[in-house]
Every structure is written in C-alpha cells, then in structure tokens.
Image: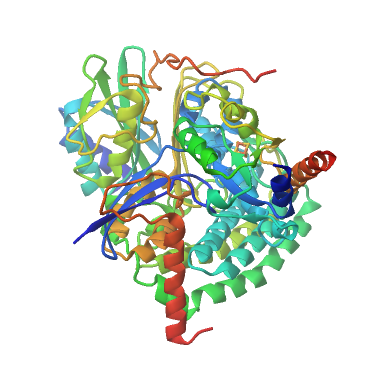
Amino acid sequence: MTREEVLDDLRKKFKDDIIEVFDKSPKRVYVEIRPDSIVQVASYIFKDLKARFNTASGVDLRYHMEILYHFLIEDINLLISLRVKLQKQKLEIDSLSPIFEGSSWIEREIHEILGINFRGHKDLRKLLLPDDWPEGVYPLRRDYKEWDKNVIRDRGV
Amino acid sequence: MSIKLKALLKSPWVFHLSTGSCNNCDIEILDCLTPRFDIERFGMLLVGSIKHADVLLITGSGNRKSMERAKRLYEQIPKPCLVVAVGECALSRGMFIHSYNCPVPIDKVIPVDVYIPGCPPKPEAIIAGVVKLIEKVRKSTEKK
Amino acid sequence: MEKTIIPIGPYHPLQEEPEFFLLTVEGEKVVDIDVHIGYNHRGIEKLSETKTFDQSTFLIERICGICSTSHPFAYTRAVEDIIPIEVPERAKYIRTIIAEGERIHSHLLWLGLAGHFLGYNTVYMWAWKLREEILDVMEILTGNRNNYAMFKPGGVRRDIKSEDIPVVIKKIDSIVSTLEMLKKAVIDDPVLHARTKGIGILSKEDAINYCALGPTARASGVARDLRKDSPYGAYDKVEWDMIVTHNGDVFDKVVVRVLETFESIKIIKNCLLNLPGGEIDANIKDIPPGEGIGFIEAPRGECFHYVKSDGTNRPVRHKVRAPTFMNLPTYKATVIGEDISDATIILAAIDPCYCCTERMTVCNTKRKKIYNGKDLIKLSREKTEILRNKMGVK
Ligand code: SF4
C-alpha cells in the first residue's frame, strides 16, 4: 500500500471515529480520534497495516490532557500519530496492552507520571517513582509543586 | 584505628555504587580496570561485595529510590572506610539539581572524603584522586 | 515443587546502572520474572521543560553515557522536524561518523561484559582494550572521550579538521585486524556455542508483539533498521549492509553485534573519505509552535524523541523513549523456562544498559532460598567450566 492508500483507507474505515487528519509532512501524519475508538483504530493500524508501535506520550495542556500514540509503518516510512484528547474531569482511556504487549510499560509510566487511568490494564503498579512517593502527586502535571520539605536546591556555596 | 587504616592503605579494595548516574562515570571506573589503565598495579581491586570493600566509589545524583539502598550499603561497609564521590553529579547533582527525584546531594547523606570533579572524570583523574586520598590518609596516620 | 525467589540487584559489582529483578525458580527452571526499574530516574523530561532548546542538548546527552550521541541526535532531529529544516550535507556526514563511532564502542563494551558473565575474562579485557582505541578516535574528532557535545539543533558544533582525517583512518584500520581476531575467538569458539546457542530464544512473533528493537529484533529475523527504512544523516549515501539472523538466541545477538561493528567501521571510513565541504550549521533562529518527532537507530535500537513547542524558547513537552524501555519487557518471553545459570547471560543479551546482581532485599520467608548476584555469575561460570571439560577444550 502506498501512503495515500493508507490514509484513504483510514479515513473511509473510521469515518465516525476520526475527528481531524493533519497531514504535516510526507513522513508525518497526525490523526485525532475520539477516545472511545482508540482500541479499534490502534489494533487496525498495528495488525492490518503492520505498523510498529513506537511509544505513547502524554501531555498536560491547559484545558485537557492529550495522549499521542505513535506508529511507524516502515515499508512506506510513515509515522502515524493518533491523538486523543481527554477531559481533565475524566482521565480514563482503554488500555492497548491486551492487543500488544509493547504498550504495557508505557501505559504504566503515563499512569504514574500523569495520573491517567488505563481501563483493562493488568498491572498498573509504579514503574519509575519510589514507593514512598505520595499518592495523587503527578510530577509531569502542570500544577506539580514540590511536596518534600527536606529538599535542598542550592549548591551550598 | 590507625593500624587498621594503615593496613587498609596497602591494597585498597574498591566497591562501586551508582545512585542514578548517566553511566559514563561508571564506565570510566570500569575502564580503570582494563589493560590501558589497570589499577590493579596499585593493589586496587574492584570487588563485588560491599563487605569486602575498603573504599566506596560513589557516582550519580542521588535518586530517591537508590539513595535508600545506598544508605543501607554504607551501613554494611566495614569501618574505617573511605568514600570517594566521582563526577559532577555526585558532587553537587550537576544538571539534575532541580529534578523532583534528586532531593539532596550525596554528601548530606553519606560522609565523603574526596571529590573527583569532571563530567565524566577521565580514568587518569579517578586514579589520581584515589592515590591522593591514600597519600593524605597515610600522612595523617604517620603523624600520630 | 518448592518455589525459590531470587532477587538480582539493584547493585551489581561490575555493571553500571542499578536495576532489580525478581526471578522465581522451581528447581533449576525459571518460572517467572519481575523487573523493577526506577533506580536511575532523574526526571529529565520535566527538567528539559525548564531549559531552552539549545541547553537541552547538553542535558539530553547525559541521559545515558553510552548513548551520548543517540539521544541528542534524535532530539535535534525532533527540533528540526518542528520547523522543518534540512541540515547541511557536511553536518549530516559528521553526525553519521560520530553516531557510528558510538555504535562501535557500545557494541564492544557489551561484548566485553557478556564475556565476563560467561567467565571469559580474556574477551572482556580484549574488547575493552579495543574500545580504548575508538575512544581515542572520538577524542581526536570531538575533544572528549564521552559526552561529545557535537550536536545542536540545525547542525553540529565543531568541524572535523582535514588534517585529522588520515590519522583517524589509520587508527581505525589498525583496529580491524584485532577485531577480526576477536570475532574468530568469539564466533568459532565451541564452548561459547554450547553456552549460548538455543538459549533465551525470542521468536519473531514475540519480537513483533513486544515491539522489540535494534539488534534484539534483528537477531530474531525482524529485518528492521531505521538507517535503511527511514534514512537520515548520510546513511543513504554510503554502502553498508543490514545484519539479520534468524534464531533469536543469545548467540545470534552476539553475531549481529559483532558483525555490525564491521559495518560501522565501513561507514565511518566511507564518510570520512567522502566528506563534502560547506557549512556545518543551518543557524536556526526561532522555533515556531508545533510538534516534532525524531527517531534514530541507536546501538540498542530505536531512540525516539517527541518535542512540543509553543513558540517560546523552551519545549512544552519533551518525551524520551530509550530503546531498552521496549526491549526489557521481552524478558518475559526469553527467560521463563530457562536454567538459572543461563539467566545472567540472557538478561545481559539485550544489552540493557542494566546493572544488577548484588542482592539488597532480605527475604526471610522460611523456605525461600536466596542467591545473590555473585552466586549467579558463579553458577554461570561453573557451567562454562563443566562444558569446557566435557568438550576437552582447555
Ligand atoms: S557526572 Fe556527568 S558523566 Fe558522571 S554520571 Fe553525572 S552526568 Fe554522567
């Protein structure tokens, strides 16, 4: 399949799920989809288009949070980034880890540093932060404040 | 005390401990072992267990999770012992000073005897640092 | 049967980074593995948001000492993707040379450590001695043994002087013969065959399912290399081959890495001889709002950076995904079902920037037996010794 065919295919197949397609450059496409349809779209891209899952990245923006799932189709050298926007009151999305294992660790990480809940993920334990890290403090959120009273931030000179 | 220290200086065994470093300092320490630098000439040996060590080489910026372990390791090392902080990270946390996961500098947790600056310090610098430490301790024991 | 839990880590005598594994074994067989990471987490993604685009390159370099080119390379490509801008030809060649030099020293480093785990300290010493030569080359080209600080968004910081080129080529040529010897010693050794063949197999399906990367995937027959699939730098302008093997065991991972080293030498020489003239920096002034993605083939696999800018001089979000992050979970597929004496080498086989094997947790549950890392390495070495005697090799 060529690049155009892939994009047309996506547009046709997921007419109702896709909100916007932003064709940035020959190698990059950003597709915004509705959060509920992430599992269908992602599994189609992974299984049928034979893409490799690169990673996911979460961002805390002013009015919503955003997760980008990056998939690379190596045969045509096209990177598709699926964008989902989550309302801050309801930070929940379906997990992709039942479809492919590769997403399980990155979901753990996003859960830990941004506090987004992944429905259906088997193992959402802490990955990076220490065990005594306080509940409900997420370091990569915009409103993160220093919580530890004992920190030293000067160089002692 | 002084006789123990004196014995320790003949052939110091070092243990290497990383507390959230970028690896470079650690690799340079390992480099000291390999044929070009070969610290075994000075009787130094990198050992696998903290209980056999006389000198603790510590690198990294003191990450919350590993600092807990570092503290426990320091309790296990036979005293008297010498602690050497290797690299900018271990000295003052370098670039990571404002990181949420690196709360305090290492020398606030573990008493440090010698600081070796550099990012990373060259193997020559590490060897020179340890040798200087030995000299210093030797002089201080001789006086007594 | 009685289950034994073996904690490995977080501190290990010879490795660099701390990481912590919990192996559950029944008799000699590993039945479960759990990996704990985070002993190295320094919050770099957050820190990067407080630095300007230019300052960030220095921070990114210090994510990992062995990958101190890969991360800035991916990051600068992500920043260039925001604008978008092409870097000058000469800068592309210089970037390629530095990146390949790093690949050689990283693979040699791994080879040495793998030898050490198997009880072949000679391989360890030889590999690291050779590595010193490469570090010398890098010192000539960039001014430092590690942390080269060569990359900046839009180009490179320093030029390669024309009088250095013959010196460097001579040095690289002198490595080849020793490397050949090392290759023979490693690949043709019957004991090593017996120790590493058919062990820790990662099947092709698993490699795809776990999204494994780099040499780990290529050893399982997944013919993917970003340098070929999505060419960047000067990789599409010079001749080289992708190394792919099909068994997915530890031995194949060794072979892929050793052969890749030769390819890297070829690329460096090619680039140095065909270095085009001209500018080395595209002089980026402002970075517009937008998003950029950069990925490159690091020694261990694909290194992925995502940068979001809002038009100021600092990134809003900078996501870093190192290759080991994707390769580590494959342990679930490779270690389970193997002997514990093989566990160390399998854990080391993906080249995980990892460090382990000194026990720190105390499990005083009654029937749990505890090994520490040293016992494990000892087990691994004893096995080699037994094999050696059986085969009559001295
Ligand atoms: S001092 Fe520099 S080289 Fe050493 S661990 Fe820190 S950042 Fe890495």
Q: Is residue A81 visible?
A: no
- Seen from the viewer's position, the closer of residues A80 and C150 is C150
Tell me if B22 is positioned left or right of C2 in this view.
right
- Seen from the viewer's position, the closer of residues A77 and A109 is A109
Locate residue C154, reporting x and y percent: 60, 33
Locate residue C56, reporting x and y percent: 57, 28
Q: Quadrant of the C terminus of chain C?
A: bottom right
Q: Residue furthest right?
A: B143
Locate residue C247, reporting x and y percent: 34, 68
- Residue shown at 43%/61% (left/top)? C375
- Seen from the viewer's position, the closer of residues C357 and C188 is C357
Report the colour scheme: rainbow
Tell me if C64 is positioned left or right of C380 in this view.
right
Tally of numbered tags = 0
Residue A37 to residue C118: above or below: above
- Residue shown at 46%/17% (left/top)? C310
Q: Is residue C226 visible?
A: yes
Locate ligand 1 by image quadrant. Answer: top right
Tell me if C135 is positioned left or right of C45 in this view.
right
- Seen from the viewer's position, the closer of residues B71 and C186 is B71
* Residue B38 lies in quadrant: bottom right
* Residue A56 lies in quadrant: top left
Locate residue A27, reporting x and y percent: 40, 39
Residue C71 to residue B93: above or below: below
Q: Quadrant of the N terminus of chain C?
A: bottom left
